[in-house]
Amino acid sequence: MFLKEMSKEQLTALKNELTAKYDEVKNQGLSLDMSRGKPGADQLDLTVDMLSVMTTAEDCKGENGFDCRNYGVLDGIPECKKLFADLLQVDVKNIIIGGSSSLNLMYDYLNQCMFMGVSGCEPWSKQGKVKFICNVPGYDRHFAITEYFGIEMISVEMTNEGPDVEKIKELVKDPMVKGMFCVPKYSNPNGVTYSDDVVKALASLKPAAKDFRVIWDNAYIIHELTDTPDVLMNIFDACKEFGTEDYFVEFTSTAKISFPGAGVSAIAASDNNIAEIKKRLNFQTISYDKLNQLRHVKYFKNLDGIKAHMDKHAAIIAPKFNLVLDMLEKEIAPLGIGEWVKAKGGYFISYNTIGCSAKRIGELCKGAGLVLTTVGATYPYGVDPEDKNIRIAPTFPSVEDLGKAMEVFCLCAKLAAVEALV
Amino acid sequence: MFLKEMSKEQLTALKNELTAKYDEVKNQGLSLDMSRGKPGADQLDLTVDMLSVMTTAEDCKGENGFDCRNYGVLDGIPECKKLFADLLQVDVKNIIIGGSSSLNLMYDYLNQCMFMGVSGCEPWSKQGKVKFICNVPGYDRHFAITEYFGIEMISVEMTNEGPDVEKIKELVKDPMVKGMFCVPKYSNPNGVTYSDDVVKALASLKPAAKDFRVIWDNAYIIHELTDTPDVLMNIFDACKEFGTEDYFVEFTSTAKISFPGAGVSAIAASDNNIAEIKKRLNFQTISYDKLNQLRHVKYFKNLDGIKAHMDKHAAIIAPKFNLVLDMLEKEIAPLGIGEWVKAKGGYFISYNTIGCSAKRIGELCKGAGLVLTTVGATYPYGVDPEDKNIRIAPTFPSVEDLGKAMEVFCLCAKLAAVEALV
């Protein structure tokens, strides 16, 4: 029976029952964490052999004979560019390889837009109050960068096909709307992959700002959970028809393919943007870590190697996602107090409350020893206007801990929902 | 006999002789390079075993049990902070570990000063035309960053004890003079280590700008060529008396200890500056490459380990420096056409012409197949006002190639000097 159909007596009885259970759980002194999109240790074990693929001086030579132990090759070694070009389905000349953090590349790119300007335009910071479109719910670290630069964030709700493009079309008529963040595949947190229609609509945008930039964060490009993956249309292919390639800068990394914080990141962009980024890069560093680039190429060999490797990740984490989904289906669905998308990849399950405060669920979980992503963090300024969204990150805990964590979560979700009705 | 004491006939005869030699060398089709401060392959071989110190999951655990394969520990793993704290002679709490490039940390720090502001002050970019003191001759990549940010560069000549502090004391009375670059030990390129008096004078500066910042690039902190190394006074110790710790931010890396472009970089700074940098770092990245941090600690173990390792570097490169110095002593000194400092460490020998154009020497060398650091690059905007300085980088070529390169260099230096007099 849906909670909202229950009588006052039924609700009171349920509340008492749930409160008793909650007190019991609280006394267990649990310490559980479903807060961050971190791989588990068993996933990291998958790539541990990568640490042994280069042990001699000879191993450190790139395919063109370049000694990767020394300075040089600012934009990445050719074989690593090739690997990312294949992954991102772009030409090798449209790839720049970075350090271990794609987030850092994004920060850096926005920094460039803000203070030095792109496409020959004045720096955004000199043009007035810059605004950015933030698809919500979204990734807290994207919003944090935007906020740090003092950019005004305008939320656009995600649908089951991607962001609301009609709203975006209207917003980009404002020349101070300078861009937006997108996680187009298995979006953080709601797991949605942008449909072809949405990708085409974005590619055909006619922003008033000539220096409009979409940060196309393809973080989960190959992070599948099923044998029938979503297929994301290649943004640069979509742009060709409209000549809008310069509006999109794509980022990805092997953070959740090899090692988080010790992988390899990359940018894919138009010829113009690549030239502009390279010019700046020349002032920023001498070269990124080419040994790590080569290590990754030697280990994965090619795109098929990465694909086969990602199957191993899926074998470890798909059961975790299924556990979460099963628990929600069993505990939450019958009561009609929450909804979620069954993502086919990525790192998160996005839970939306129906009829109760997400913050309250977060509080209750915390009280019971379960840490969730800070409620509200999936919205700009940390404020979820409807106080409904919770990001569940199932990968890091063990299956056993995850089971316990989800028991606590469901208990708290139910208790919060009953409280709201009583 | 000094060239300037020669008769016209003697000079003409010498010119003919040198020109004939030059034409001969030109026909050899040489391809030699003394342009960049890169270690040779034999130096890189010294650390190749570092690539094997971590091969298992267990190896990837830090001393506090943290799994360095995963996200987290934004400011560096404790054992790596300790290693750099010992190297830089500061407290562990005053260290932040970065990625593989200290140049990138410097760029990033100046970016912060320019556009976000430090010490609670307005960003430099909002205060008007920012000026920076550049000690000359100096490092082209420092000047490149300053120029990129549109900062006006004011040259201050280096003496044999460091920069001209009297001139600096005057300059910092201007509130728009916001800082300077220093390579305090084995300065790039002239090899001078700042004397205690100079360090104290810098520490006691009373700049008009409250957000004055010295980029203390201690790139050659432990890069000795002799058994009697220069001892640089610790800048933060010197600052204590004057309460000027916030004016100095120190940078270093293992680029020329382990692998250029694949080492570990670090910042040492005051409590205030560390707090400010960490706050910003939080928006920039999730964490730097901790596997590489741990790899370095496991390999070097401690400061003594680094010291012992640097002896091996010295054994390889000191003979190269001696070769250059011997050739200069033999070929150039008797003619009185050039001067240089016999550096006890670092990566360069700085050559100053007497009575002839450095650019002309560069041209002649290029014509004979020898690449030098672009003449002028050791000065802001690439313009050496006296056209006298040439940076010689002896480390990368083999001893054999270096010998040939120095023969070409001396020949060209002599020819240019004779041309200037004839």
Image (cartoon, coloured by chain):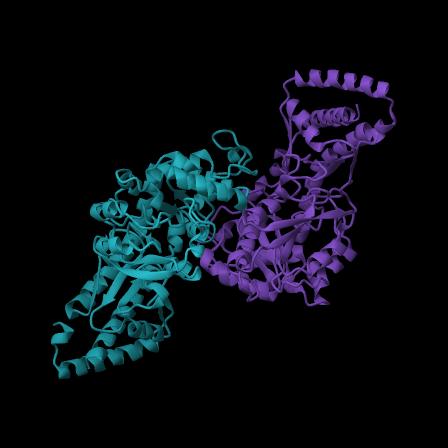
Chain colours: A purple, B cyan
Q: Position of residue A398 (x, y in %)?
A: 66, 29
**Residue A133 position within the rendered picture, expressed as x and y whole percent measured from the top left:** 66, 52
Quarter of the picture containing the N terminus of chain A is top right
Image position of A209 (left or right of A56): right
Q: Nearer the viewer, residue A142 or A260?
A: A142
Horizontally, is A157 left or right of B261 in the view?
right
Q: How many marks?
A: 0
Is B284 or A267 nearer to us in this picture?
B284
At 18% across and 83% down in the image, what residue appears? B12
From the top left corner, tell me how far across and down residue A373 is, in percent. 64, 35
Up/down of A392 relative to A53, above or below: above
| Left-right relation of B259 to A195 | left
- Report which quarter residue B404 is drawn in: bottom left
- Quarter residue B383 falls in: bottom left
Q: Is residue B293 above or below residue A337?
A: below
Question: Dividing the picture into quarters, in which one does residue B127 lie?
Answer: bottom left
Q: Residue at x 69, y 27 (%)?
A: A405
* A197 to A416, vertically: above or below: below
* Residue shown at the point (68%, 68%) measured from the top left: A243
* Residue B288 in view (yes/no): no
- Residue B184 is at least partly visible in this image: yes
Q: Where is residue A299 drawn, in percent x and y? A: 59, 48
Q: Where the C terminus of chain A falls, by quadrant?
A: top right
